[in-house]
Amino acid sequence: MVKVNNQFIASVLVIDDDNYIRSSLRNYLEDNDYAVFEASAGAAGLKLLEKESIDVVLVDLRMTGMDGLEVLAIVKEKYPKLPIIVLSGAGVISDVIKALRLGAWNYLLKPIEDLSVLKHALDNALERALLIEQNLKHQANLEKLVKQRTEALEHELAVRITTEKQLLLRTQELESYSYVISHDLKEPLRNIGAFAHFLNEDYSHCLDEKGLEYLYHITSSIKRMSNLVDDLLHLSRIGKRYTEFSLVDLNELIEHAKLELYELIRTNDVRFEIGEMPKIVCQRTWMIEIFKNLISNGIKYNDNPKRIIKINCIENQKDYEFFVEDNGIGIAEKFHEKIFELFRRLHPRDKYEGTGAGLAVVKTVLNQHGGSINVERSSLGKGTTMKFIIPKLILSSVNESEDGGGS
């Protein structure tokens, strides 16, 4: 923040070697109450960062001399919490992917036809940075309180050595959480998979069609759980990185999601109306989780004897819009934003099952894909339509490699 006319306003550093673009961005941002610093080269921008209080960096990826990727790498090393938004020409897809992996918070395609998109991206970055800062302060306060309380207990209960050892052991267990997930949880998964394989190899001839179907479900669930554990580890790391993307047929993926919800669907009268789905580049395991969560919510939070789930997609120039509609109990308007909070529940556990984590997971996954989710339509007793968006930006390079591989 910088002080202007006795008021603190957000500051933006624009790094771009195109004078016209810098001037246009500066004029627009200043009109929208931002303090703007500008640099025509990467090195000059880095010097400004050392001298000025910058809240957000806006950097072009393709510049003469030090390019945007070099600037991004240096900024992330020196100022890891500073939001960075990259500007890219529509055809430079590989650079955008590299930038996202290096830690860019967002991207914008040039030319920016609607500058309100820029303001929206900057506002989101500032809001996210503020939330991160508040969370870190809150965490530091909690750690301080825990430390103070621990010291008090150690002083008051010095004679209770056994209890202190148990507390220490508990702390060590918490610190080794990631290891427990990656090793201790995957080990039994491997064992289950091995026994399922032995069962298939040695006893499949003893199973009827239904038994073979159950065995297939076991094997599929083991594989999905193993992939999910790997992705959870990625998400738990500081500076979350994108997991590997692949080209996925969503028609097949939704059928897979329904298969994993087989028991829930079987025990309820559910009718699906699914439009034609595209092939998109995404992280398959997490995309299954998105559809599973939205479908299961439409079934579980539904008192109708005949449950209806509709899934449709609209392809736009730069993104895909997906709509998952149900005829369930609906959501009051005042909760349309709050339902995406972790462990947020709107109903008693004895009436509707669930942990309240599903939509928070969906939102996190979509954020990783550069997308978003919101309640498109919903009111009590009138069902719900969820809308989520996935950009098409990262499709080009993968599609080109797919086409090239077949020629």
Image (tube, rainbow, N blue to C red):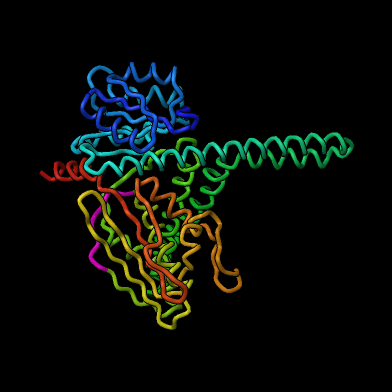
Residue found at x 83% / y 40%: 162
Residue found at x 43% / y 59%: 221
In the rendered structure, the answer to whether residue 353 lies left or right of residue 251 reads right
The image quadrant of residue 368 is top left
In the rendered structure, the answer to whether residue 46 lies left or right of residue 277 reads right
Asked whether 17 or 199 is in front, the reply is 17
The image quadrant where one finds the C terminus is top left
As displayed, is residue 65 above or below residue 369? above
Taking the view exactly as shown, the residue that stands out farthest to the left is 407
Residue found at x 36% / y 28%: 36
As displayed, is residue 321 above or below residue 140? below
Residue found at x 38% / y 42%: 243
Taking the view exactly as shown, the residue that stands out farthest to the right is 159
Percent position of residue 74, x then y: 39, 22
- Give the magenta-colored segment's residue range: 275-282
**Residue 263 visible:** no
**Residue 13 visible:** yes
Percent position of residue 286, x then y: 39, 52
Is 279 one of the magenta-colored residues?
A: yes
Asked whether 173 or 49 is in front, the reply is 49
Is 211 one of the magenta-colored residues?
A: no
The image quadrant of residue 352 is bottom right
Taking the view exactly as shown, the residue that stands out farthest to the bottom is 305
Percent position of residue 327, x then y: 40, 75
The image quadrant of residue 73 is top left
Percent position of residue 118, x then y: 31, 40
